Image: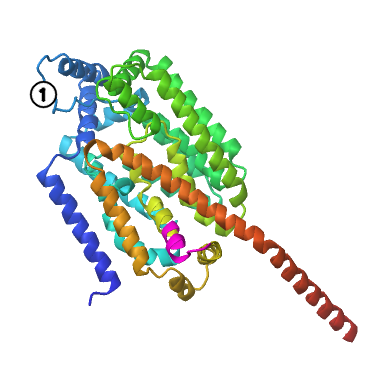
């Protein structure tokens, strides 16, 4: 029988072979191709925005174009990235592609390493077997977005890796720098500044200052590169109007529906986004205020807070939910253990208590017994996972992914709420125990002093 370590190595090897086979047999690196085309345009003195818009317009103006052909993708990152493109364009294509491939793979591994830190010791026993498959199931639904080569994998890898010393040791400096750098490529990623506010203490000032700098950098580009900035905004607009690329957020699904019906979408989607973001933000702040200063509760809150933070993004894409795959898996497994192992309220609270004990660093042997995967949990999780993936075909992928995000976010909030109630019920007995211990210690000290 294979040992656990050999089985993990075998799974990683199989995953690498599967990705290589998918890349060989089908389209790959479609987002990287957009980056490379823009870099070559800059290198020869061209304008990647104007050229991209011209290509899109030519495609859009075709009378008898095939409806099955996807509209051309163009460069839609802000002009502050153009100096980097100029450097990339001076490097031979094969070399820049090789370097980018290595950097991209490092970003994927950084994401996995960072979210691995959210799991307890017992959860890592089964999670290590699933990590090789995470790339194929962004947001727990099957998709080949990992083959796109989108820079978001690298950005999330850097941001999440920088978040680890933040939630473990309260050092958030590198996180703020990583988010600021990521926002230069994708401005909506500034919403990630909410994460340290929800996890750390006294982070409001730093988050607001970083957000202010990010906004100033964005709007300053209109002065530094006025022509390119105007073209960039036009390219982004066409991404919605012609490519209908709104993402999986509630506002995104509404925007797509309105565009397909030929209706204006700007105002309705803005109103829906603000309403949804306010609702999620209120829930996040409400729960974080209670769990932030309680280590066991905070450890279980971290994946929930990350999912909620990404829900604040106005345009959630497949590569955004890819970073949430393991946090969603952790939330789902914890909820399933509670529901299936605890048919009544008291048993549910005892299950939550065991979750807290494990996250507090209980002995590994005890944690293993608490989190031993039983057959009902395994069957329920497998059935739920397969049902979601069979249903998520074609256009159904995005609404099902949104339903998964909202459902598991709500379920994660529920587990922290139940755990908080358990803490409140146990508080009087703990105070009584501490009082008795203090009185006993004081009595022993007095006796020793008297005898001395």
Q: Which residue is drawn at 34% across and 30% down?
A: 253
What is the residue that sits farthest to the front in this orientation? 344
Question: Is residue 319 among the parts visible in the rendering?
Answer: no
Q: Nearer the viewer, residue 443 or 249?
A: 249
Magenta-colored stretch includes residue 433: no
The span shown in magenta is 335-344
The furthest residue to the right? 450
Image location (x, y in percent) of residue 280: 50, 38
Horizontal arrangement in the rendering, residue 49 relative to residue 414 (left or right): left
Classify residue 57 by image quadrant.
top left
Task: Please state, as top left, top right, bottom left or bottom right, where the N terminus lies in the image.
Answer: bottom left
Residue 412 visible (yes or no): yes
In the image, residue 200 above or below residue 317: below
Instruction: Give 264 or 301, whichever is nearer the viewer.
Output: 264
Q: How is the image coloured?
A: rainbow
From the image, tell me which residue sits under label 1. 66
Q: What element carries label 1?
A: loop
Question: Residue 148's x, y, as percent?
Answer: 23, 39
**Nearer to us in this view, 423 or 124:** 423
Question: At x 40% / y 24%, what residue is drawn?
Answer: 269
Q: Where is residue 67 in the image (x, y as percent from the top left)?
A: 14, 24
- The one nearer the camera, 313 or 86, is 313
């Amino acid at each position: 029988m294979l040992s656990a370590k050999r089985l993990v190595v075998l799974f990683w090897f199989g995953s690498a072979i599967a990705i290589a086979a998918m890349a060989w047999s089908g389209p790959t690196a479609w987002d990287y191709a957009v980056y490379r085309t823009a870099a070559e345009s800059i290198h020869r003195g061209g304008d990647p925005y104007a050229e991209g818009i011209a290509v899109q317009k030519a495609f859009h103006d075709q009378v008898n174009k095939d409806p099955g052909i996807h509209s051309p993708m163009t460069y839609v990152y802000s002009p502050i990235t153009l100096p980097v493109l100029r450097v990339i364009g001076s490097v031979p294509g094969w070399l820049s592609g090789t370097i980018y491939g290595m950097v991209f793979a490092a970003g994927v591994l950084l994401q996995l390493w960072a979210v691995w830190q959210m799991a307890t010791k017992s959860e890592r026993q089964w999670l290590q077997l699933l990590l090789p498959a995470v790339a194929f199931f962004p947001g727990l639904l099957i998709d080949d977005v990992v083959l796109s080569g989108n820079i978001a994998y690298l950005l999330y890898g850097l941001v999440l890796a920088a978040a680890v010393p933040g939630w473990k040791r309260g050092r958030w400096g590198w996180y703020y720098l990583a988010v600021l750098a990521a926002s230069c490529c994708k401005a909506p990623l500034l919403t990630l500044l909410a994460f340290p506010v929800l996890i750390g203490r006294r982070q409001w000032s730093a988050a607001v200052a970083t957000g202010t700098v990010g906004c100033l950098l964005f709007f300053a580009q209109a002065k530094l590169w006025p022509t390119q900035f105007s073209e960039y905004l036009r390219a982004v607009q066409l991404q919605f109007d012609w490519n209908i690329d709104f993402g999986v957020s509630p506002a995104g699904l509404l925007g797509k529906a309105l565009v397909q019906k030929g209706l204006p979408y700007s105002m309705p989607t803005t109103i829906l986004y603000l309403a949804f973001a306010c609702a999620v933000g209120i829930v996040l702040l409400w729960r974080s205020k209670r769990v932030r200063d309680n280590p066991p509760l905070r450890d279980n809150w971290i994946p929930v807070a990350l999912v909620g933070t990404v829900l604040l993004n106005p345009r959630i894409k497949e590569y955004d939910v890819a970073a949430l795959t393991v946090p969603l898996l952790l939330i789902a497994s914890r909820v399933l253990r509670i529901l299936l192992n605890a048919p009544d309220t008291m048993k549910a609270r005892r299950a939550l208590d065991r979750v807290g004990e494990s996250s507090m660093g209980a002995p590994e042997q005890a944690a293993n017994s608490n989190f031993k995967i039983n057959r009902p949990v395994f069957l329920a999780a497998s059935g739920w996972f397969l049902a979601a993936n069979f249903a998520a075909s074609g256009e159904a992928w995005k609404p099902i992914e949104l339903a998964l995000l909202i459902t598991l976010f709500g379920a994660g909030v529920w587990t922290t709420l139940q755990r908080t109630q358990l803490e409140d019920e146990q508080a009087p007995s703990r105070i009584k125990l501490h009082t008795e211990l203090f009185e006993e210690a004081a009595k022993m000290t007095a006796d020793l002093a008297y005898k001395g």
